[in-house]
Amino acid sequence: MLKAVNSLGIIFFPAFDWSISPTHPEREERLLYTQDQLKEEGLFDIEGIREYKPGVASVEDVERAHFCFPEVDAVTTRSHLISAGGAITAAKLVMDKVHDRAFALVRPPGHHAMKVVHGSRGFCNINIEAVMIEWLREHYGVRRIAVVDTDCHHGDGTQDIYWHDPDVLFISLHQDGRTLYPGTGFPKECGGPTALGRTINIPLPPGTSDEGLLMALDRVVLPILADFQPEIIVNSAGQDNHFSDPITNMNITAQGYAELNRRLAPHLAVLEGGYAIQGALPYVNLGICLAMAGLDSSGVREPGFDPERLRQPRKVTDYIAEVCEIAGGLYFNPPTEPKDGVFADKWFVRRKNIYYDTDEITEAQTEMLRLCGNCRGLLKIESRSTNNPLCLGLEIPFHACDECRDLGYKILEESQLKGEFRYIQFVNKREKEFVRYGF
């Protein structure tokens, strides 16, 4: 009997009861063909590979990662909580040493959901990777984590959540934002003042093939991971770079995805995008599963595979080489100051205007990070949107110093007395206190 080199847990949740619309690219059929393919190929007959059902994330699990206004229940469905719960289940399997690796094949996706949530953007309501990461930190004390996002769209939500966090390395390989939603993800976006160089963006030109993707992996991602030495590597495994995807312009194959996974060797993979639901996802997911298990995936071939048609032009190769040189340098030699905000007394301030394309919501936000030499710093966010009046989010980080902790409570008390905020979410990760106020 065939045996997995790396034991693999697969968490499957196709969210039968949730879709944006019956014809929307993000609908339940996305994973039904994958489910059939994995079973028909006998994946679960291989010793060391086993399927698991997802758990359900709690409101507190979500609030470790997000400020949700007016509340978590208003911006999520049961399916979102199960999708995030599937990612948590994957993490638990690895941390408890039940399996060497785990792949959460779940939907809805999450990597466009930012720190503040007023609704859905980029098909995402809550960031399932971030919910999983914050759960790992609280329950297992994991500190250094790397997220490698290989979705075709820039993972702007994950970037936003960990912009100020030096212990989470975020690397995104994606189609150039000048040609695709969300229009971000350029090398100059490399982190806040306490985490410069911990965000690395590698924008790839349309027409990038397996050759270009693996070049970026070898020249940028793997050397950075070797230096950062994370305890856990997470792959945000978006599959819309595939040559047949209907909403992108890349030329990656199932073989390319499998080889990327083999070289990256993530502990955890979490499904993100991918909308060629018959011609790509079943084959790409099979290739990734085999690669994660350390098994031969060379026989996986999707319909329409033509190596000559997918060959990468020389000009694309040369351009990617230039991008790699810039991106890699920003980790090892980051800029001395961020370019996206201002310093005000002991605070770093960013002002952002965010559009929720799925729900057609506009948000205006002021984010303030206390610059503290003893901890990551108190986070304060004031936000208003076309859905909600002025709201406040306050977060005391896991390893907060006493000064930041006390200041957080002081600001909370003053804000309650003034009554200027319609909703307040207060998260004290140090002492595991989660409080919400509505006025």
Image (spheres, helix red, strand yellow):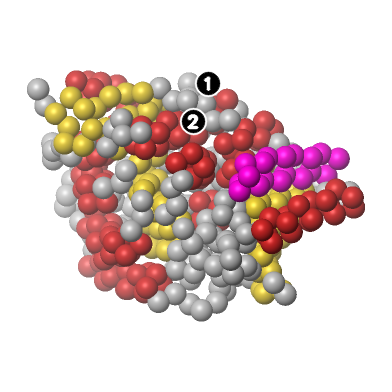
Quadrant into which the N terminus falls: top left
Q: Residue 172: give x, y in percent of width and height.
A: 41, 56
Q: Is residue 249 visible?
A: no
- Our reading of the magenta stretch's main secondary structure is strand
The relative height of residue 28 versus residue 112 in the rendered view (above or below) is above
Q: Residue 296: give x, y in percent of width and height.
A: 13, 38
Q: Residue 130: give x, y in percent of width and height.
A: 50, 45
Q: Nearer the viewer, residue 261 or 371?
A: 371
Q: Residue 140: give x, y in percent of width and height.
A: 45, 41
Q: Hey, which quadrant is residue 346 in on the image?
A: bottom right
Q: Rounded to the nearest whole Å, what is the CA distance between mark 1 and mark 2?
A: 16 Å
The relative height of residue 96 versus residue 39 in the rendered view (above or below) is below
Q: Residue at x 56, y 54 (%)?
A: 399
Q: Residue at x 61, y 47 (%)?
A: 429
Q: Which residue is mark 1?
A: 17
Q: Which residue is mark 2?
A: 85
